[in-house]
Image (cartoon, rainbow, N blue to C red):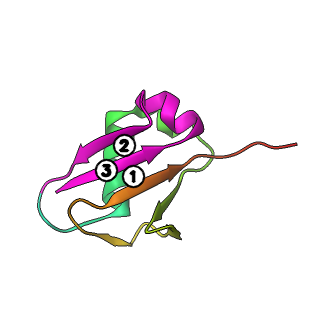
Amino acid sequence: MELKVLSFGIAKDIIGDRMSSIYLEGTDASLADVRRHLLEEYPEFKSLTSLKFAVKEEYRADDFRLQDGEEVVLIPPVAGG
């Protein structure tokens, strides 16, 4: 399964690009699988206090099931003031 990944903030810095793709084995995957893949591929994600995902313009939980070709948005912790 191929997924498009759109990254912002520190997530973009960790991955090194705003748009990228990841490949997961099989045809059935969840956002938990994406999280696991990112932590294995980019250990720097372990240092983040949170990492949220959005799919189809809505925040989604880790158990959200994905379809091939879908776009996953990485939303890192945001500091404001």
Res. 4 mark:
3
Reading the chain from its start, which is encountered first: label 1 or label 3?
Answer: 3
Q: Quadrant of residue 19?
A: top left
The amino acid on which the numbered mark 3 sits, given as a three-letter code, is Lys
Measuring from the top left, give residue 68's x and y in whole percent: 20, 63
- Which residue is the extreme one toward the right? 81
Asked whether 61 falls inside the magenta stretch, the response is: no
Name the quarter where the C terminus is drawn.
top right
**Mark 2 highlights which residue?**
38
Identify the image quadrant of residue 16: top left
The answer to whether residue 4 is left or right of residue 47 is: left
Q: Amino acid at mark 2?
A: Leu
Q: Quadrant of residue 31?
A: bottom left
Closer to us: 69 or 37? 69
Residue at image coords 42%, 31%: 17
Which region shows up in magenta? Answer: 1-25
Q: Evaluate if marks 2 and 1 touch, with contact meaning CB atoms under 8 Å apart.
A: yes
Work out whether 40 lies above or below 29.
above
Q: CA distance from mark 1 to mark 3?
A: 14 Å
Label 1 SS: helix
Residue 35: assigned label: 1
Q: Please give the name of the residue rendered at 54% of the width and 41% of the height, measured from the top-left corner.
A: 8
Taking depth in this image into account, of 54 and 47 the one nearest to the observer is 54
